[in-house]
Image (cartoon, rainbow, N blue to C red):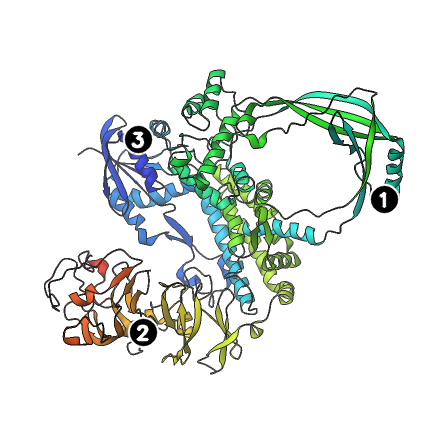
Amino acid sequence: MPPTVLMVAEKPSIASSIATFLSSGRAHSRRSFLDVHEFDGTFKGFQVRYKVTSVIGHVLSIDFPSNYQNWDTTDPFSLFQAPTLKSEANPKAHVCKHLQQEGRGSDYLVLWLDCDREGENICFEVMDSVLPMMRKGAGQQVYRARFSAISQKDIVNAMNNLGLPNKNEALAVDARQEIDLKVGVAFTRFQTRYFQGKYGNLDSSVISYGPCQTPTLGFCVERHLQITSFSPEPFWTVRPHLNKAGHLLQLEWERGRLFDREIAAIFQKMVADSQSVKVANIVKKEEVKSRPNGLNTVNMLKVASSGLGIGPHHAMQVAERLYIQGYISYPRTESTAYPQSFDIRGVLSVHAKNPVWGDYVISLLVAGPHHPKAGVDAGDHPPITPMQSATEADLGGGDAWRLYDFVTRHFLASISADCKFTRTKVSFIGGGETFHCTGSTVIQPGFTAVTPWLSVTENNLPPFAIGESIPLSEVEFYQGRTSPPDYLTESELISLMEKHGIGTDASIPVHINNICERNYAQVQAGRRLVPTTLGITLIRGYQSIDVDLCLPEIRQFIEQQITLIGKGQADYAHVVQHALQEFAAKFSYFVSNIERMDVLFEAQFSPLAESGKPLSKCGKCSRYMKYIAIRPTRLYCSTCEEVHSLPQHGSIKLYKELVCPLDNFELVLFSLGGPDGKSYPLCPFCYNHPPFEGAGVLFGAAGKVGEKGSKGGMPCNLCPHPTCRHSMIKQGVCACPECDGTLVLDPISAPKWRLDCNKCSCLVYLPENAHKIVTTTECCEECGSTILEVNFNKNTTPLPNGATLYKACLICDDLLLSLIEVKHGRAFFKKSHRGGRGRGRGRGKGRVATRGRGRGRSRNEDPRMSFRDF
């Protein structure tokens, strides 16, 4: 059997392209947990069997152990020294198991992850899973492929020039992840608990802090404070107007503007009394507007926002899709200079037949493309380049086409001639004062022919002669007022972040998106970022305690140290320890002085006791708790001074004044909007403090708002209480065919009765002509599902002889099965009319053999156990 070479890409589509290019389309594909493409070829001079597969981003994610997850029992300060662990980032995708399975018995591993720091880090995550499963051989077994575009030329070239993974670059990512996790979670937990426990109208699920996010917000708030503290001043200027050869001209005053009205008025009178101006000088000069450098990520994001109206986060997503589809090169690069070896003419020729810019490309090929300007070569990837010709129809129009169009035109501009134009300045003297006007005439449009938004505006002046006297038609005495700066645009904010070293080319759009999603700032007209009351209060609070917490200098220093780790010039452990020690000291000081920030919150937000409306009774004091509808929605008992989290993004109302048999809290009903929105009752106390071990899951909200991995979120449809009539045990019917959840009878779905999965979006609509449907205490002998009791309407009953009462198993009874409808899930029922009411005792394919309420075997243990297919 020939040796096996396992090749792993970062995304399934990239793996497919790699296999296609290297096998010349001869690869055979099969499905494991992820797609695997196999073909025969040569490697290091030997015949081998190639297997090409992928991961789906990071394989592992960093987090705290379970004993540090509880907000109530964990001191946030302890997180700075807490251990961390890496677990599978997407357990449901079974990526680790997939890598181990495909790596078993392999002889070589070739890593095709994205060629940046994150990709380098994922390389070592892949190696952790694959290396223990590989055959042990002599010599090098692990290789790294480095490429910048998904094209046959780039892929083949990368395969012919394999290198080694870079451990230092991977450690740099580990350092950033650990620092951001510990600092962010410590501050976020403390802030969230402190302020959400006191104020009711904080419109944010989590009051988060981030070493990058907070300085980003700080820039926005700083501009806001400049605007609100600005005091406008009046100013005056003199504006002579004249008419020359049919051209109406307004002259500019060399003094600009004056802030003393009386002095400005004297000058205006002097000029007006002169009644004319004399041409003092004419300067005509040829100028050059240089073609742009190559396009890097930051510049692409800035233009996407300011020129195309596409937010940076969305622009990055669009660019990544274009890269994966092979239309552009890797969109995460700091370089603006092309390497000497870059085949510019080869890339250019690909676009010669494009119906939009093909003619321009041909003219460049005939004249010879100009060498790009000397920019910055960061040594990562070349500038963003269009690798494949496309039309608007090919890309489906929209943002994908507009971004691709810009990338292509920018590339063409970067290898075009400079724009040449003549600038003319004519100076005038009148009443002892000097004025001027300017004009411009384009000589050679150069690169602006393909990027018209960068073109020079032509303004042809009439002919003037030195010494010529020209009468004035008007001398305007203009009064204006100074105006404050406007709010930062996304483009301006990106420039500030780049200047101060906040984030990387890949993470900058994420940080901007975060401050918007967390309601710290809002994107308004012109894509300007306006901070909210919460965002302003947070930054002012940090400034009142420790201004360093919202300034970029600390993060800039950390990023510099992380860069040194990536270059092998700094020790990983030392950098992490130093950064955490510094932030731990600041955290301790922040906690001891939190009252300074609290004063600002108190001035802006309402106390919990004054927020919300009475809704349901507390099981401890029997007093009404208030429902606070502002995000995050929650219940507050002013007597017990306790806050109870609720599921988010839906509506809450009292549920028939029923109480939980465990703790006496009144139940509430949560409902999602829309005709297919799920509903379920919950006990506010059980939801936050699950009384049964393992029963609580993250279902709409966590035990503490926003905490990933915290215990909680147990509504009644997940409760295993054996006798409560609202529990999963009493209302559950059978296993969900879509996941490992249970289909539970929706308590308020009448008259359109249905079952809802308590974990996924699967919905099963029961017979429309049913007057009432309830679960019984009986179970199906064949499959273990709960027997349903259906009361049909007497006028539309499908039962013989006009009968209305019917008890049957949803899975095994053909009549009941034929009357249902499935939504939001795969088609998993099979219409198999064998006649009459027969339950079909035969073990047909797909028969369910589990009750699906936490008992017996789960559906996943035997792939044959599932609902019958439609």
Distance from label 3 to label 2 (Cα)?
55 Å
Choose between 41 and 456: the one closer to the eye. Answer: 456
Choose between 274 and 452: the one closer to the eye. Answer: 274
Which of the numbered marks, if any, corresponds to residue 727?
2
Residue at the (87%, 33%) spot, across then down: 271
Q: Amino acid at mark 3?
A: Phe
Quarter of the image for residue 281 reads top right
How dense is the environment of label 2, judged by Cα within 10 Å: few (below 14), some, or many (20 and up)? many
Helix, strand or loop at label 2? It is: loop
Residue position for label 1 = 260
Location of residue 365 in the rendering, given as x and y in whole percent from the top left corner: 46, 19
Distance from label 1 to label 2 (Cα)?
79 Å
Location of residue 847 in the rendering, given as x and y in whole percent from the top left corner: 16, 61
Q: Is residue 365 above or below residue 614?
A: above
Work out whether residue 215 can be spotted: no
Location of residue 196 in the rendering, given as x and y in whole percent from the top left corner: 54, 67
Of the 4 image quadrants, the one containing the N terminus is top left
Q: Pointer 1 and pointer 2: residues touching (CB < 8 Å)?
A: no
Q: Is residue 36 above or below residue 617?
A: above
